[in-house]
Amino acid sequence: MAIFKAAAVQMRSGKEPERNARDFEALVREAAGQGATYVQTPEMTGAIVGDKDARATAFTSEDRDLIVATGRKLAAELGIHLHVGSTAIVRADGKLANRAFLFGPDGSTLAVYDKIHMFDVDLDNGESWRESSAYEPGTEAVVADTALARIGFAICYDLRFPQLFRAEALAGAEVLTAPAAFTRQTGLAHWHVLLRARAIENGAFVIAAGQGGKHEDGRETFGHSLIIDPWGRILAEAAHDEPGVIVAEIDTQHSADARKKIPNLKNAREFSVSLRGTGQGALRGAAS
């Protein structure tokens, strides 16, 4: 079991990676200055760009990416675990990945995660998003076994798929993460309740660094970065959409204690589902 200080960095990334990298560095340094040894940034730390042609000039391969290089340098210099919530990376096949990185205190890459669930939705206010038109979804859940804790990865829209978080909890994750660029509309409706639910369901800490405010490409994100304990209590919140840093103490013993009190991870049972009264017969599935 470990006790450490965690930080969530709230940003308002624009179209220019160079400017975002400067903001990223300043906020990470601020978090480390407050004693955080795990620091998480939001989804799309490197740039938020809606236009297809602009994306082609803003994004590059992992080995040339400015945010990756800056993150690795900062982790080593500050001696922290630095979790870049995500940045857009051009894969070897030329497709884009919405990719998270965890750098260790020596600057090494401890884990990489590509967002699995694509945000393809039509909202009531006329907003329409088709993330799958630009990004290739990941296919693998990731849990990093670090000196601080076992950390499970997710990105933004992944939050709406509880089976991902449950699989990571069953793999031993004590800290679950959901860095995001939640829209203002969906954030007002669901951000707090979904994050608290993921914590309670899995007896895990949840850390979610968010993008916030009006971005250069016109979108508006919710902010309200959160750190939540395994009992669903909010330990820290950026109760606004401005850039900034929140910090809270993480004691992984609290995850073990919550799972002992409510042992739902152990008590889960497989079951089948039957569809009745429609002439369709039985639907077979399993849950755990």
Image (cartoon, helix red, strand yellow):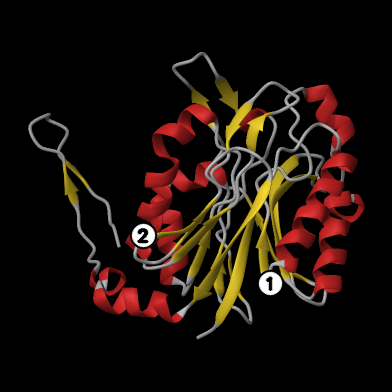
Dot 1 alpha-carbon crowd within 10 angstroms: few under 14, some 14 to 19, many 20 or more: some
Residue 252 relative to residue 286: left or right: right
Q: Nearer the viewer, residue 113 or 71?
A: 71
Label 1 – label 2 distance at C-alpha: 24 Å
What residue is drawn where x is 85% and y is 31%?
A: 56
Report x, y in % for residue 34.
69, 67
Report x, y in % for residue 202.
37, 64
Residue 151 relative to residue 107: left or right: left
**Residue 194 in sight from this viewpoint:** yes
Q: Nearer the viewer, residue 200 or 11?
A: 11
- To which residue does mark 1 refer? 35
The relative height of residue 204 versus residue 180 in the rendered view (above or below) is: below
Q: Find out whether the residues at labels 1 and 2 contact each other: C-beta distance under 8 Å.
A: no
Q: Nearer the viewer, residue 245 or 105?
A: 245
- To which residue does mark 2 refer? 232
- Of all residues, the one furthest to the top in this rendering is 126
- Of all residues, the one furthest to the bottom in this rendering is 1
What residue is drawn where x is 55% and y is 44%?
A: 156
Residue 108 relative to residue 274: left or right: right
